[in-house]
Amino acid sequence: MDFVEQARWFTPVRDGCRPGKVTLVGAGPGAVDLLTVRAARALEQATMVLYDNLVSKDVLALVPAGAEMIYVGKVASHHTLAQESIIDLMVRLAQAGHDLVRLKGGDGYIFGRGGEEAQVLAEQDIPFEVVPGITAAQGAGACAGIPLTHRDYSATLVLATGHLRGANEVALDWPALSRPRQTVVIYMGIGTLPIICRELLAHGLPGDTPAALVEKASLPEQRCVTGTVADLPQLAKDENIKAPALIIIGHVVKLQAQLQPQAVAALL
């Protein structure tokens, strides 16, 4: 549904209106029972919520029935609102005196653009609080049976984004991502997976390095496909992997077969 502003949102809540408080909440990887207690409390007390595409229905069900629910989600090639417009809307609502929750999947400060939103709130002297969430990488690793660090396999964890930038390029530090004894987790990279794997191989990462795709982490529909960096693009095509999904690269992926049963049982 296209976004439509409602005039009532901008009517001052009280005379001599002071700004409302904005609570930036990380909703976690998807499963409602992976919310933090503070996040659940913020949702249960909310009167107005701006929420993104990756927030599950079970999480949204915690919001009181009478609260204003404003969808500002973004998916690839289709934005209900541009990020700048979302920030502008959030500021105007707070300046009208509304206390509101800005709800994002995962953790807002990890590839959620929460830092940009908090910056503007600070510049506008709007009070705000940040409630961290379990980020998608943590949820995907734990629920799929892939420990992101392990003394025998990985002493470093790198989080990166696979979004295209500029001239149809993924602007990443490929030599750094191709180093041994580390785990690399790439967000928002399903659409650029062939480019990512090609560049990693070109910069020295062995083609037989274990790799995985975790789709809809922590939810009942979760899927995990494992292979190598060399064959991951074809596997993604064969298995019809769709966003939201994470790419996990590193020798920790070898543990998935052993640890998966416990991880799957935890979802039931």
Image (cartoon, grey):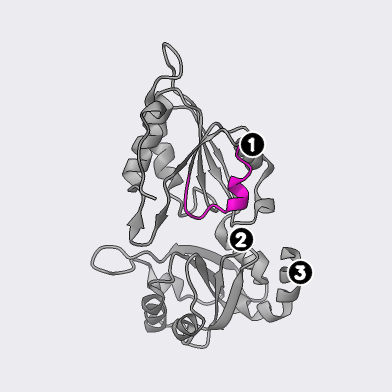
Quarter of the figure with residue 197: bottom left
Q: In the current view of this chain or complex, which residue is farthest to the left?
A: 167
Q: Which residue is mark 2?
A: 138
**Image height of 245 relative to 113, above or below:** below
Quarter of the figure with residue 168: bottom left
Q: Is residue 176 left or right of residue 79?
A: right
Q: Which residue is mark 3?
A: 265
Do callouts 2 and 3 mark residues in contact (Cβ within 8 Å)?
no
- Is residue 166 visible in the rendered structure shown here? yes
Which of label 2 and label 3 is nearer to you?
3
Q: Residue at x 59, y 57 (%)?
A: 29
Do callouts 3 and 1 mark residues in contact (Cβ within 8 Å)?
no
Inter-mark Cα distance, 2 to 3: 17 Å
> Could you tell me which secondary element the residue under label 3 belongs to?
helix
In the rendered image, residue 58 lying in the magenta stretch gets the answer yes
User: Residue 169 placed where, x, y %?
Assistant: 29, 69
**Image height of 185 relative to 100, above or below:** below
Inter-mark Cα distance, 3 to 1: 29 Å
Q: Residue at x 34, y 47 (%)?
A: 81
Q: Return the mark for residue 83.
A: none
Stretch in magenta: 51-64
Identify the main secondary structure in magenta.
loop
The quarter of the image holding the C terminus is bottom right
Q: Which residue is mark 1?
A: 44
In the rendered image, residue 179 lying in the magenta stretch gets the answer no
